[in-house]
Image: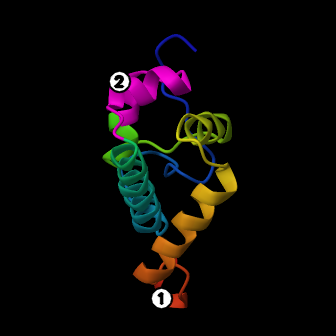
């Protein structure tokens, strides 16, 4: 534990350094989720700090999510959804619609 980064199975290349075929897909997923989160937050006139407070997340984490640098866990997705007065299923539906427009689910668009 002490300071070592944990590798998430399937997300980080074994041995580090190189990129896996799924890296592009993950980047697209994170970017689209982040843009959606920002849009939902701004539409409700919430700052990152207020959304963070309402969801129990730090404002810098909200910013990292919005910039596509991090992916939320399931419990964070639920907390963010509640803070935005919507259901997680609505957020996932909107994300799926955004991903459809990018061709994410096409054979050639899979990461």
Marking on residue 108: 1
Q: Is residue 110 in the magenta section?
A: no
Residue 13: image location, x then y, percent:
49, 52
**Residue in the picture at 46% in, 72% down:** 98
- Residue 40 vs 93, above or below: the answer is above
Task: Using the image as rendered, state which of residue 92 and residue 71 is in the foreground.
Answer: 92
Distance from the alpha carbon under mark 1 to that under mark 2 = 38 Å
**Residue in the picture at 63% in, 47% down:** 9
Residue 30: image location, x then y, percent:
43, 55
For the residue carrying disc 1, how many other residues have a C-alpha within 10 Å: few (<14), some (14-19), or many (20+)?
few
SS for callout 2: helix
Q: Is residue 20 left or right of residue 76?
A: left
Q: Which residue in the rendered view is the most extreme toward the bottom?
A: 107
Task: Using the image as rendered, state which of residue 53 and residue 23 is in the foreground.
Answer: 53
Marking on residue 49: 2
Q: Is residue 49 in the magenta section?
A: yes
- Residue 46 vs 23, above or below: the answer is above
Q: Is residue 111 visible?
A: no
For the residue carrying disc 2, how many other residues have a C-alpha within 10 Å: few (<14), some (14-19), or many (20+)?
some
Residue 22: image location, x then y, percent:
49, 66
**Residue in the picture at 35% in, 24% down:** 49
Q: Which residue in the rendered view is the most extreme toward the top?
A: 2
Residue 82: image location, x then y, percent:
62, 37
Magenta span: 45-62
């Amino acid at each position: 534990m002490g300071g070592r980064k944990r590798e998430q199975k399937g997300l980080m290349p074994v041995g580090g350094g190189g990129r896996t075929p799924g890296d592009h897909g993950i980047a697209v997923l994170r970017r689209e989720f982040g843009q959606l989160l920002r849009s939902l937050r701004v539409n409700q006139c919430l700052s990152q700090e207020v959304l963070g407070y309402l969801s129990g997340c730090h404002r810098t984490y909200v910013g990292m999510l919005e910039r596509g640098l991090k992916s939320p866990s399931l419990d964070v997705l639920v907390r963010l959804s509640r803070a935005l007065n919507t259901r997680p299923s609505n957020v996932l539906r909107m994300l799926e619609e955004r991903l459809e427009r990018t061709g994410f689910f096409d054979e050639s668009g899979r990461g």
